[in-house]
Amino acid sequence: MSRIVSFRRMQDGTREDYLLLDESERAYALGLGGRVLESLRKLDTCVEGYPVSRLRHCLQAATRAMQDGADEEMIVAALIHDIGDELAPYNHAELAAAILRPYVREEVAWIVAQHGLFQNYYYVHHFGGDRNARERWRHHPWYEACVHFCAAWDQCSFDPDYPTEDLATFEPMLRRIFARAPHDPRYFSAA
């Protein structure tokens, strides 16, 4: 039988309890890359109306980023930018950014978090929305990088004829990114 904590309410936990949980959670975190890959595989379905599956769209975006000379963090960001579609269709960008944030530089997480708003430029005016809503970020230091992410990699990646790398191409870099120690102080253990 595995070890378990002594408490039923967190307020009753001891240092030993929380050291045990920290050890367990760190071991679990080592498998994150595999769980992210499995979540990507679940995107291999077509949302009615689209010419490619959500997975193929993500693979195309990552292929374009790689061909454009992007670094590994940005390629992985392009690969998983829509991973939140499955559970958070109306705020998928925020979910994808939250997954990435502890493992990539803040610029990459910001771009992924904002890509939904920036993508609106291409279509929201057809529904009476403000396609220029992204302009509120015009003076942000990563504004142009997000415009590029959307223009060069995201909005154009619905082409069933585009020569797209498969998931195995990106798996090693994804695993490297998610095997990193988290760099955000909010994710460090007090142990």
Image (tube, rainbow, N blue to C red):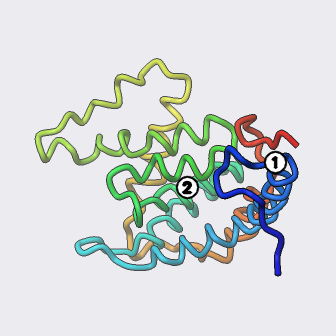
| Identity of the residue drawn at 72% across and 47% down | 12
**Mark 1 vs mark 2: which is more N-terminal?**
1
Dot 2: what SS? helix
Kind of residue sitting beneath label 2: Ala
| Identity of the residue drawn at 75% across and 65% down | 28
- Image coordinates for residue 42, horizontal then vertical, percent: 48, 77
- Image coordinates for residue 89, horizontal then vertical, percent: 34, 58
Q: Which mark is residue 78?
A: 2
| Identity of the residue drawn at 45% across and 59% down | 84
Kind of residue sitting beneath label 1: Thr
Q: For this view, does 129 lie left or right of residue 170?
A: left
Dot 1: what SS? loop
- Image coordinates for residue 122, horizontal then vertical, percent: 28, 46
Q: Which of the 4 image quarters holds residue 109?
A: top right
The quarter of the image holding the N terminus is: bottom right
Q: Is residue 16 above or below residue 159?
A: above
Q: Camera-side residue: 66 or 92?
A: 92
The quarter of the image holding the C terminus is: top right
Q: Which of the 4 image quarters holds residue 142?
A: top right
Q: Camera-side residue: 186 or 130?
A: 186
Q: In the current view of this chain or complex, which residue is farthest to the top? A: 139
Q: Is residue 22 above or below residue 137?
A: below
Asked if labels 2 and 1 touch by Cβ distance under 8 angstroms, the answer is no
| Alpha-carbon span between mark 1 and mark 2 | 42 Å
Q: For this view, does 183 lie left or right of residue 19?
A: left
Q: Camera-side residue: 189 or 17?
A: 17
Q: Is residue 125 above or below residue 16?
A: above
Residue indicated by mark 1: 14
